[in-house]
Amino acid sequence: MENKIQDEINSRRTFAIISHPDAGKTTITEKLLYFGGAIRDAGTVKGKKSGKFATSDWMEIEKQRGISVTSSVLQFDYDGKRVNILDTPGHEDFSEDTYRTLMAVDAAVMMVDSAKGIEPQTIKLFKVCRMRGIPIFTFINKMDRQGKEPLELMEELEEVLGIQSYAMNWPIGMGKEFLGIYDRFNQRVELARPDAEERFLPITEDGGLAVEHPMTETSYYKQALEDVMLLNEAGNDFDEERIAVGELTPVFFGSALTNFGVQTFLETFLQFAPTPQPRKTREGEDVEPESEVFSGFIFKIQANMNPAHRDRIAFVRIVSGHFDRGMTVTVPRLSKNFKLSQTTQFLADDRETVNEAVAGDIIGLYDTGNYQIGDTVIGGKANFQFEALPQFTPELFVRVSAKNVMKSKQFHKGILQLVQEGAIQYYKTLHTEEVILGAVGQLQFEVFEHRMRAEYHVDVQMETMGSKVARWIENEEEVKESMAGQRALLVKDRYDRKVFLFENDFAMRWFQDKFPDIKLYNQL
């Protein structure tokens, strides 16, 4: 039995896809699902008029706008591996949700638009992966369009991101003249528009094509061959150990939209992506995936995935051991036991009950309001908590109230649930208890307003407070209400901790000069 569980754990590959908006992240997710046999038809995100929506976008506002707002969890089998993809929001306003998701993966696939190169959101997300030391695999997308020169893109990876790269394959032409890729790793040329029999052409030991083909006469092939020779002479060496610690990124060129190079990428990625990795407890101990103790942590909570049932799902990354449906677990924060009889796995809004799962898997627990993001879930008598997940300090704030006072019960229930998801942050004024919401970006407020109307049937009115500098207080007991004023609003957060919302950095520095004994701190 132990060997069987060990084999199961070793077959897991859990990763996230990161990119700037519109680099093709959701499209490649669909193509991977297609190869895994999880979907029959890969519809594209853009096809709004056709009524076909991307499989991984389920929320109504995502279907209207064609963006991924929440992180989906998708699972399929391929070539003896069980693949868990965490599709993350590309939009920068949802970086907090994305950061938490990156805590639950063992590797990342970075999508780069060949025409735009490395973009701001990609840089931010890359830094989080780098901080965690997880392997990063790069897919340079949209080779079916005109873009930057491949060597320029490789240089950008190294200069802008500071990571060394190794080209696993190399494009032959681009745009309308995109003829295929020279696959250095598999020693073959893969044609973009093959005749019936001829998708792959073998390469000889000296690097040329082993068969006659009209493509060899083109300037695009000759240029690609020159570039490959240059990479062989002067490029980085392929080094599996450096890939494993995130110091070297394997680079693949292709086109997710035309489904070119995606399968080759998937097969090579699964070969080098890591098996489930250990995770540290708050005491600094490593919990190994092979441990007999079942453990995991909640990195995401999503309300109303099925509005008809008003459900809440807590997403758990299993860190160690074996999950059996019906088992009893402890949440150390609450010192309470829960029987896990309602558990689920996902393909966007399709879900099925899961009876067994192992380290590396993501499962959903039906939640009646007990769980919080960051909670540790443990089976047996063990007692520890995993390292805390990052919490962002919001920058934008609004006062919010229900337009119809009669709906205040639904209003407070809706806010409580959306706050527990981590979509927005909740504050209230000290005496009047007005509700103030904080967010990292404006789009979070729009999604909040949309979901309050669609899921809780409450119209809200929001009064913009603009950007503020939020700071928590180490020595709360020394804070007097008289210290607050127009430029320093004193509020409480959802845990009843006091927080100052300063008008700007100048107002915060003025406060610190005036009250040097008050110790302020930032959440992240």
Image (cartoon, rainbow, N blue to C red):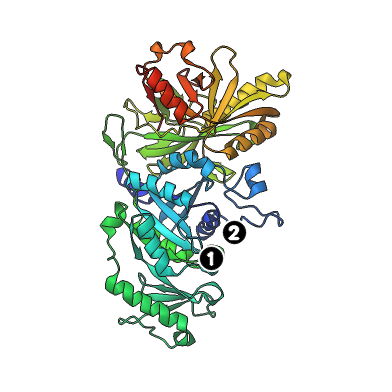
Rendered view: 494 above or below 327: above
Question: Contact (CB < 8 A) between labels 1 and 2?
Answer: yes
Which of the numbered marks, if any, corresponds to residue 40? Answer: none
Give left or right: position of 399 versus 268. right
The residue where tag 2 is placed is: 42
Which of the numbered marks, if any, corresponds to residue 259? Answer: 1
Is 51 or 389 nearer to us in this picture? 389
Rendered view: 150 above or below 519: below
Instruction: Tell me the residue at 61%/45% (across/down).
Output: 58
Q: Is residue 268 visible?
A: no
Q: CA distance from mark 1 to mark 2?
A: 10 Å
Location of the C terminus (image quadrant)? top left
Q: Quadrant of residue 415?
A: top right
SS of the residue under disc 2: loop
Residue 383 horizontal/vertical position (percent): 32, 25
Instruction: Tell me the residue at 32%/27% (across/down).
Output: 384
Q: Residues within 10 Å of mark 2 (few under 14, many from 20)?
A: many
Q: Is residue 252 visible?
A: yes
Give left or right: position of 227 versus 462. left
